[in-house]
Amino acid sequence: MDLRGSKQYVSRFWTPLTIEANGQVVSCNFGCDEEVAEDAPLCVIPTQAVEVVEDPAATLEKPNVMTPWLDLLTAAGAKILLMRGRFFDNLGELAENLKSGVDSFEMWQRRVDGVVDHALDRGLGRAGKIVFMGSSRHGFAVLYGAARNPKIDAAVVIGPVIWWPWLREFQGMDENPLIQRHDLYGLIDRLPPRPTQVQMGYDDRRIGQRHNERLGSLLAQAYESKGVAGKFLRTPMEIPGHSGGPPMRVNETVVTFLRSHGFLR
């Protein structure tokens, strides 16, 4: 994919920010220019890639699906807010924190809430147009954060971690009280009626295909039971999952999804 004309590589498109968020200092980078409409959606994307947050224009290949997402979203007229994820940066460290009783999930939520409040208070984004997006570990973080924050208006995830003990870093932690307390399955009913897109592979062994199937089924049921079945989209990918990037057709469905629900013109 030739991205030489992409806004993500234009330095003046980005404005580095440091946000005070409920006692935390969060490194962010805001992407917007004069061509972006005032009512454009603000796509908030957490990442463990510190160098991307610090200088996205200088980072040619960004992790996971961020490179095509940023290209497609900025071309479609979206605003971007990259944020340092921190609490999900290192999975081994996250597992050790949970074992020692450190509630990283609650600290993550305070981080999310503070960043969203800052974006709305400072006019970076508008109420009704906040989109939370992430993949893998930050796919979990996005679904979890959106479920607990009603100011987030839509969620888009790819290959989200669903049940932490399935991952090798968390094996044997099925009975961990913090993992049980913050079980993603228990938050599904709090996502509707907000539009949610979940992209899943057909044999994702990293996060467990049976968890993929269960999450997709429970989300579909939750949206259908509230009469908003059309606001949930499960997008299958022609890859097993966690095994390389999805085809561009799948990436492009993000823009189509946001456009169909009125977030993009």
Image (cartoon, helix red, strand yellow):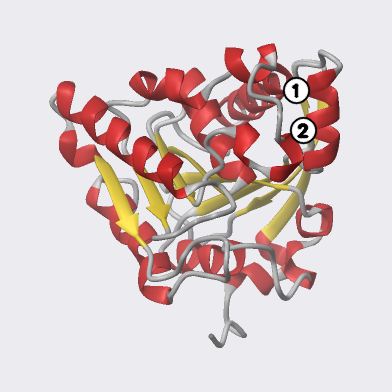
Position above or below: 215 against 135: above
Q: Which mark is residue 177?
A: none
User: What count of labels does the image hold?
Assistant: 2
Which quadrant holds residue 124? Answer: top right
Residue at 57 percent across and 76 percent down: it is 6
Residue appearing at x 81%, y 20% in the figure: 99
Q: Are marks 2 and 1 in contact (CB under 8 Å)?
A: yes
Q: CA distance from mark 2 to mark 1?
A: 6 Å
Residue 74: percent from the left, percent from the top? Answer: 50, 63
Q: Which residue is mark 1?
A: 104
**Residue 109 shows in this picture:** yes
Tell me where residue 194 appears, x and y as whole percent: 32, 31
Q: Going 46% across and 23% down the picture, which residue do you hit?
A: 147
* Residue 212 placement (x, y as % from top left): 42, 45
Query: Which residue is the site of mark 2?
Result: 87
Q: Amino acid at mark 2?
A: Phe
Q: Residues within 10 Å of mark 1 (few under 14, many from 20)?
A: some
Q: Secondary structure at mark 1?
A: helix
